[in-house]
Image (cartoon, rainbow, N blue to C red):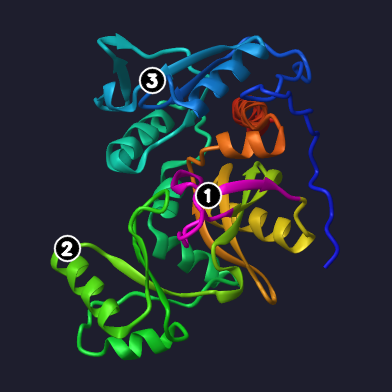
Amino acid sequence: MSPRKIQQKKAPAMPGSPAPEHPAPRRPRTKKTVAILSRKRSLYSTRRLVSAIRARGHRPLVLDTLRCCLLLAQGAPRMTYRGVEIRGVDVVVPRIGASITAYGLAVVNHFEMMGVPVLNPPTSIARSRDKLRALQFLSASGLDIPRTVMAHDRSNVRRLVEEVGGLPVIIKLIKGTQGVGVMIAHTLPEVQTILDTFWDLGQEIVLQEFVAESEGRDVRALVVGRRVVGAMRRKAKKGEFRSNIHRGGEGQAIELPPAYTEAAVRAASIVGLEVAGVDMLEGHAGPRLMEINSSPGFEGLERATGQDIAGEIIEHALTYAELKASAPRLSRT
């Protein structure tokens, strides 16, 4: 399979620089207020998004999701932040952590009720957070995924393991992130012990096929709109099977083959995300969709590729806001 360049403009990496340079705005725009839902202003992705907004002449507004107060009355949803009413927001970029998913979804939904465009709607964020639900959507749409089983039947673990291709087997928490709650089991007693432990704790888990040819590595593609704006191959550190950057994995920039680009864009579209990190395993027959993330971190990707990922996200957010603002006018003409 011959690789094809991703449709993107590469910014040269600056030696010793923590992030790529900001490109100039692509076209003049009316000044907008772009809200970022984030627990911490100091997080890399949040800082980069703020910088990208300012570089384009717009106003960033960082809101701690848990400090947003949602007010409801008949036909008049409102929101306050530290006692001050939120008004004049043109578009919202949600960065909702897994630990606050429920309240985060309520905040995102409230912005939509207030008529504010949100990059990644609440239904799509919720869909991506549930690993099994996301895989159900991807599988039903014809995308290749590792064989996956979810069950509560403790009586025949051997059969469950056979359904995903035998040992070793990957065991995952339904709502884990950054490699947390992902384990590998090499024997049936190991599988039984792990399953019993999680079930006794009331946790939902899935068993998944171990794709041997992709052991210790995967591909992360970041989709913005309907384009892949950056991609890297992640390799696990020695002694670790999880390739997540947060687990010590290393990222190397790659040019995606067409099949991988198409699969990543389709996956984001199927789940309904405008911004998505799509994780794929490199199977013998091509990409195998593993996971989709609605609030992908991109520090490792920016460092690996030298690309302005934050700028791509903000450019799309601004365009998205303009399209949403013009939609009512278009519908009346």
Q: Name the residue under label 2.
A: 202
- Structural distance between the alpha carbons of marks 1 and 2: 30 Å
36 shown above or below 197: above
- Label 1's element? loop
User: Range of the magenta residues?
Assistant: 235-254
Q: Is residue 243 magenta-colored?
A: yes
- Label 3's element? strand
Residue type at mark 2?
Gly
- Structural distance between the alpha carbons of marks 2 and 3: 33 Å
Q: Considering only order in the chain, which callout, 3 or 2, is on the residue closer to the N terminus? A: 3
Q: Name the residue under label 1.
A: 249
Residue drawn where x is 77% and y is 28% of the image: 11
Q: Does the residue at mark 2 contact the one at mark 3 (Cβ under 8 Å)? A: no
Q: Residue furthest front?
A: 238
Main secondary-structure element of the magenta-colored stretch: loop
Residue type at mark 3?
Leu
Q: Name the residue under label 3.
A: 63
